[in-house]
Amino acid sequence: MHIAEGFLPVPHAVGWAVAAAPFVVHGVRATVRQVREHPEDRVLLAAAGAFTFILSALKMPSVTGSSSHPTGTGAGAILFRPPVMAFLSTVVLLFQALLLAHGGLTTLGANVFSMGIAGPWVGYGAYAALRRLRAPLEVQVFFAMALADLATYLVTSFQLALAYPDPSVGAAFAKFATIFALTQVPLAVIEGLVGVVLFRVLRSIAGPELERLGILARPAERAATEDGVHA
């Protein structure tokens, strides 16, 4: 969800920018390291950024000062981990603010924090937990994508509640979250399904890359697992 230009009071805008900055700096370093160590990942990195840009540009009016939309950050978090998505999301949100009037420069820090930091970390946490439980990849992807989306809208609701605590932060959060939920929950489910389709396509056209990134088991690992099960 993109908070519109000028909608946050100046102290809040500055505070969220300061809170997001360390994550973005770390994300820049993580991205540079990924490209330096694995130059072949440039295309997949660009695809992750483009996927986030396209999905998060599909905005739907939700409540004054913000909008609802898919985020696409869960896919990049699975592929390259959340720090990289903090940087990619910042680039996406900056271009959207400048070219599409979607979000804003004064609210960039708040939008990066919700969509580029909170969302990817929650989505990746769900992915990692389901991976440890050996859930099918499709289940891992669905919940990672859906929960990254929902986490973004919850953080945005909290940001707006802090800025406009009417009559209290808790009451304002409940109001914003309830209104957002009408559009965001179905969008999160749809985004999860889109993610499943995306990774099925990636598995067919970029299987070796997914194996190297640790998303798919390598043939030797699959064979060892199968032998252990049969034994």
Image (tube, rainbow, N blue to C red):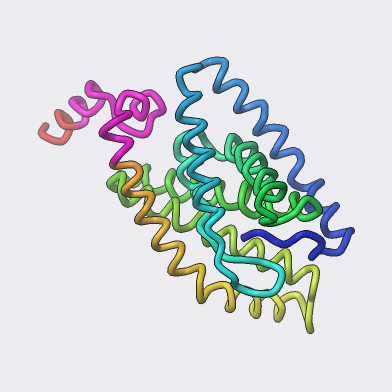
Q: Viewed as shown, does residue 168 lie left or right of 73?
A: right
**Nearer-the-camera pick, 130 or 16:** 16
Q: How many marks?
A: 0
Placement of the C terminus among the 4 image quadrants: top left
Q: Position of residue 67 (x, y in %)?
A: 62, 66
The region drawn magenta spans: 201-225
Vertical relation: 230 (above or below) 111: above
Name the outermost residue toward the left. 230
Q: Position of residue 18 (x, y in %)?
A: 81, 46
Q: Viewed as shown, does residue 5 lie left or right of 61?
A: right
Q: Position of residue 25 (x, y in %)?
A: 72, 33
Which residue: 47% across, 23% down?
Answer: 41
Vertical relation: 46 (above or below) 82: above
Which residue: 58% across, 34% down?
Answer: 84
Name the outermost residue toward the front. 99
Which residue: 75% across, 50% down?
Answer: 109
* Predominant secondary structure, magenta span: helix
Name the outermost residue toward the bottom. 167
Which residue: 68% across, 47% down?
Answer: 99
Q: Position of residue 7 (x, y in %)?
A: 79, 65
Placement of the N terminus among the 4 image quadrants: bottom right
Q: Viewed as shown, does residue 51 lie left or right of 195?
A: right
Q: Is residue 187 magenta?
A: no
Q: Is residue 209 magenta?
A: yes
Q: Viewed as shown, does residue 77 lie left or right of 190?
A: right
